[in-house]
């Protein structure tokens, strides 16, 4: 004769607890608020820089919100067992760009589809953070810290090198930043990370200083100019770095509340690519310090909530994905804004949700959908255990 014992942890044993789990808030309202705020700011800024792009950007944002809502209901843990399929998709899409991609401004980064131009390097940021998170979770117990670091960096560097070959240096650097964040949250010894950083600095020194001095150019000439020219941008008025002079002038001219329709640096074409790479210049010139402070505050809110999700994730896999998202957001915001104010080189890194472009916007929304999924499942798991998570 068999007996059945109802444990105290069974959801049916405590109807109130089960109801609490069902009613647990499945999305982070503060993260959603930051997302909506940046979407509105994007439309306002693009309307000032290039009104003809507003309707298309609005369509990207609308589809992105739908994608985020769907992704937030998806069980992100299922992605763990698909890591090598996802990694294969990442590599294949980048190789597809190198094989049949279309060229623009000296680089081949996108594949033209029927309605949009698809840039796999943007989607690759999301795919890579999932792959690295799954790799760490599956390998951390059977590999030493050194072997784990080597494997994670190898998996990250392959797509990074392929992306840099397009050339898309900015996305390649984002891939490396994601790998560092995942290793850091995985509690890899700081000496391992310091060794990897030292190797990276040595490679950059060889590529930017030693190589050109010996007549060997690893990077394209315009990439070398961008990476070194920002130190003395006014020396060559025809260089890309000279745009930074115009960008700084535009942001300074915005003063407290901006010049509005009287803006000249962005509206007269003195700062090229203003709807994309230099969208923050448009904000600073047209909306002034107030507008720039609002945008940066929204990013601070988004990054804070992402860090919160790292802390409350129900498992290590979710925490590592969120860590990769933090690295992506912080790196892109710092580099892009720093580029517009003259403290960072021009690398083609977009400003998440703000810059015009479907691939960048949709990849960011896909990341936010994953974050909302991690948050929702963390709250549900806590409610099932009778705990209450504070916002």
Image (cartoon, rainbow, N blue to C red):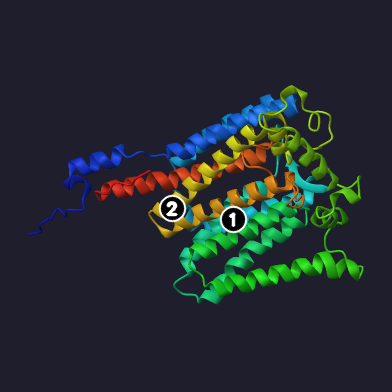
The answer to whether residue 323 is left or right of residue 105 is left
Q: Quadrant of residue 117?
A: top right
Quadrant housing the C terminus: top left
Quadrant housing the N terminus: bottom left
Query: Which residue is identified by label 2?
Result: 77
The answer to whether residue 172 is left or right of residue 233 is left
Point out which mark residue 160 bears: none
How crowded is the residue under tag 2: few (<14 C-alpha within 10 Å), some, or many (20+)? some
Q: Position of residue 306 (x, y in %)?
A: 49, 48
In terms of secondary structure, where does tag 2 sit? helix
> Would you say residue 86 is visible in this rendering?
no
Residue at position x 71%, y 37% in the image: 279
Query: How far apart are the alpha carbons under marks 1 and 2?
Result: 15 Å
Q: Position of residue 386 (x, y in %)?
A: 24, 48
Q: Residue furthest toward the top?
A: 261
Query: Which residue is identified by label 1?
Result: 128
How crowded is the residue under tag 1: few (<14 C-alpha within 10 Å), some, or many (20+)? many
> Would you say residue 315 is visible in this rendering?
yes
In terms of secondary structure, where does tag 1 sit? helix
Q: Position of residue 209 (x, y in %)?
A: 84, 67
């Amino acid at each position: 004769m068999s007996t059945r014992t109802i444990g105290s942890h069974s959801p049916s044993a405590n109807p109130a607890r089960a109801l609490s789990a069902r009613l647990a808030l499945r999305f982070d309202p503060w993260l959603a608020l930051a997302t909506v705020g940046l979407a509105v700011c994007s439309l306002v800024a693009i309307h000032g820089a290039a009104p003809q792009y507003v309707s298309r950007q609005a369509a990207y944002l609308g589809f992105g919100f739908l994608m985020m809502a769907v992704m937030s209901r998806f069980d992100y843990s299922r992605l763990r067992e698909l890591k090598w399929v996802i990694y294969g998709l990442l590599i294949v899409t980048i190789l597809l760009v190198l094989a049949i991609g279309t060229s623009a401004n000296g680089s081949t980064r996108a594949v033209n589809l029927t309605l949009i131009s698809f840039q796999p390097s943007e989607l690759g940021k999301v795919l890579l953070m999932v792959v690295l998170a799954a790799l760490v979770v599956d390998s951390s117990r059977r590999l030493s810290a050194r072997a784990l670091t080597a494997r994670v960096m190898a998996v990250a560097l392959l797509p990074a090198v392929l992306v840099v070959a397009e050339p898309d240096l900015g996305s390649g650097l984002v891939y490396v930043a994601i790998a560092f964040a995942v290793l850091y949250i995985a509690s890899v010894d700081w000496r391992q990370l310091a060794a990897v950083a030292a190797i990276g600095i040595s490679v950059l020194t060889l590529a930017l200083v030693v190589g050109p001095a010996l007549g060997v150019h690893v990077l394209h000439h315009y990439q070398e100019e961008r990476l070194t020219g920002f130190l003395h941008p006014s020396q060559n008025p025809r260089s890309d770095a000279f745009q930074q002079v115009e960008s700084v002038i535009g942001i300074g001219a915005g003063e407290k509340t901006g010049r509005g329709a009287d803006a000249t640096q962005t509206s007269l074409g003195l700062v090229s690519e203003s709807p994309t790479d230099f969208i923050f210049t448009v904000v600073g010139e047209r909306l002034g310090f107030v507008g720039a402070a609002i945008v940066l505050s929204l990013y601070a809110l988004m990054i804070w909530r992402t860090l919160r999700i790292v802390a409350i994730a129900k498992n290590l896999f979710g925490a590592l994905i969120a860590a990769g998202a933090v690295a992506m957001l912080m790196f892109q915001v710092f580099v892009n804004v720093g580029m517009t104010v003259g403290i960072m080189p021009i690398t083609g890194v977009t400003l998440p949700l703000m810059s015009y472009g479907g691939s960048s916007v949709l990849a960011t929304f896909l990341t936010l959908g994953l974050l909302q999924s991690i948050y929702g499942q963390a709250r549900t798991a806590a409610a099932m255990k009778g705990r209450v998570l504070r916002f």
